[in-house]
């Protein structure tokens, strides 16, 4: 049973650990972070802070996917309050006053909770969130430190400032510029906030309440849990899972994802074309499950399924054969063999989509092969970063197109462009250009450590 807390400028990580000693503390949540977690029904995820400006924010679909696993997801204070206000009908729990204001519609703008802060380390914040200013004004008026009219005027000034400029000095200056007679009210509000942090930092208060809330057992849901139809395995969600889910949890850095490792095998594993052929034909035949190597050959069922759709060797036009098969293949194989090759190379998971988006079990190969491939991907990443730091313009992006193509010709033991195009499609790539882009990441490692590409023990 694990509680994951995503927090940044709202509450220091050390304070979170004091309040919840067993919690796993992460930085502000961003796109992909939740998909990288392996959580289940006994786990809890608390979202407090999240990024949205410098990188993509956490998507609603990611939260729904975690909820569909049975994991408890709680939101408060900042990004957590925003997402909880949008997703509480589907099982996400919202905690605190900020969540309540968003859920009721009292607050609508995202910049109410936005702040500028250091990108890493202690995430020290440089600005004041507008929702905190609202709470400070309300408490200052209740304590008769300033009038309600003066408080409203100060909030108007603060709202006019961009969230990246919303600081106490900026608020005092803006007030002085607009109405010098109101400057004293701004100074008194700032001093009140300094004397009474417990009455001015609403986001921090809500975060601490949420931490306490997570320590108690989950209450029976007021609304139904996330229904299956709300989190279907769309191609976007599947791809995000493949991109962000660690290939070998606990062994390699988070940067080595399942899709990275599958790409490596797709490029270099000698048996990958056979794996992909069986995978594609099984799905053409309508077997939407991971094919067992001991199962019957899916080829006859795939040919029958294609025939039901009017796709036969006799009916296909000459242009189709010329596009999908090499001249040698068109001359040297049986009609059934040519049709199977065409079906495999033209297979798509959906119209216009890629053949696969994440890392299906049917394509992963053996555990030893997967682990060795993950090692190679990690080594390639380290080498590419090292080369980038030298400034020698030998990074993957600077490699000439001809160098990448020669690399694939060597790896696939072919030199003709027609052969390379066909081999790329036999390995599940949409085209040779997609294979070349994937291979760029590994060219430098192949030159430095060719043994990393030998699948002799796989």
Image (cartoon, grey):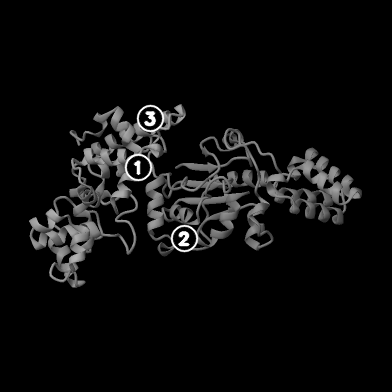
Q: Residue at x 19, y 67 (%)?
A: 306
The structure residue drawn at horizontal position 35% and vertical position 42%, both measured from the top left corner, is 260
Decide which of tag 3 and tag 2 comes sooner along the chain.
2
Residue 108 position within the rendered picture, expressed as x and y whole percent measured from the top left = 66, 60
Residue under label 1: 260
Label 1: which secondary element: helix
Q: Is residue 6 left or right of residue 304?
A: right
Give residue 7's position: percent from left, percent from top.
57, 41
First-in-chain label (1 vs 2): 2
Q: Which mark is drawn over residue 225?
A: 2
In terms of depth relative to the viewer, which is nearer, 173 or 426? 426
Answer few, some or many: residues within 10 Å of disc 3's Cα (few below 14, many 20 plus, some between 14 and 19).
some
Which callout, 1 or 2, points to the residue nearer the camera? 1
- Residue at position x 28%, y 37% from top? 373
Real-space CA distance between mark 3 and mark 2, rounded to the nearest whole angstrom: 45 Å
Give the secondary structure at mark 2. loop
Taking the image as drawn, is residue 359 in sight?
no
Examine the rendering and report whether any part of residue 60 can be seen: yes
Callout 1 touching callout 3 (CB < 8 Å): no
Residue in front for this viewpoint, 320 or 303: 320
Inter-mark Cα distance, 1 to 2? 33 Å
Which residue carries the number 3 mark?
Answer: 383
């Amino acid at each position: 049973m694990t509680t994951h807390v995503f927090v940044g400028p709202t509450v220091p990580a050390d304070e979170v650990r004091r309040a919840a000693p067993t919690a796993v503390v992460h930085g502000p949540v961003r796109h992909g972070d939740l998909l990288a977690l392996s959580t289940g029904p006994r786990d809890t995820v608390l979202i407090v802070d999240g990024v949205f400006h410098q990188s993509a924010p956490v998507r609603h679909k990611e939260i729904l996917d975690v909820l569909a696993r049975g994991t408890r997801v709680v939101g408060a204070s900042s990004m957590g309050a925003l997402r909880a206000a949008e997703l509480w009908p589907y099982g996400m729990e919202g905690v605190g006053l900020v969540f309540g204001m968003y859920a009721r519609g009292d607050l609508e703008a995202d910049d109410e909770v936005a702040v500028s802060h250091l990108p890493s380390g202690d995430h020290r914040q440089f600005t004041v969130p507008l929702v905190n200013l609202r709470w400070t004004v309300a408490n200052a008026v209740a304590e008769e430190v300033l009038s309600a009219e003066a408080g409203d005027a100060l909030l108007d000034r603060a709202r006019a400032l961009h969230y990246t400029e919303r600081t106490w000095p900026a608020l005092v200056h803006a007030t002085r510029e607009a109405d010098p007679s109101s400057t004293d009210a701004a100074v008194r509000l700032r001093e009140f906030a300094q004397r009474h942090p417990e009455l001015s930092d609403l986001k921090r208060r809500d975060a601490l309440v949420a931490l306490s809330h997570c320590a108690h057992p989950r209450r029976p849901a007021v609304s139904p849990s996330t229904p299956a139809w709300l989190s279907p395995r769309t191609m976007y969600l599947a791809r995000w899972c493949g991109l962000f889910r660690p290939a070998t949890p606990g062994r390699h850095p988070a940067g080595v994802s399942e899709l990275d490792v599958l790409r490596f095998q797709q490029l270099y594993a000698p048996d990958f074309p056979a794996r992909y052929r069986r995978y594609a034909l099984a799905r053409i035949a309508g077997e939407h499950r991971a094919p067992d190597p001991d199962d019957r050959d899916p080829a006859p069922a795939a040919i029958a399924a294609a025939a039901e759709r009017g796709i036969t060797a006799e009916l296909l036009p000459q242009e189709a054969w010329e596009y999908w098969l090499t001249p040698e293949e068109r001359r040297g194989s049986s009609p059934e063999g040519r049709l199977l090759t065409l079906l495999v190379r033209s297979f798509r998971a959906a119209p216009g989509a890629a053949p696969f988006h994440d890392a299906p079990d049917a394509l992963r190969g053996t555990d030893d092969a997967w682990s060795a491939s993950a090692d190679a991907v990690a080594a390639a990443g380290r080498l590419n970063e090292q080369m980038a730091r030298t400034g020698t313009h030998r990074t993957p992006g600077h490699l000439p197109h001809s160098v990448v193509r020669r690399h694939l010709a060597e790896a696939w033991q072919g030199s003709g462009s027609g052969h390379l195009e066909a081999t790329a499609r036999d390995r599940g790539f949409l085209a040779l250009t997609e294979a070349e882009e994937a291979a760029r990441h590994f060219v430098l490692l192949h030159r430095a450590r060719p043994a990393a590409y030998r699948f002799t023990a796989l």
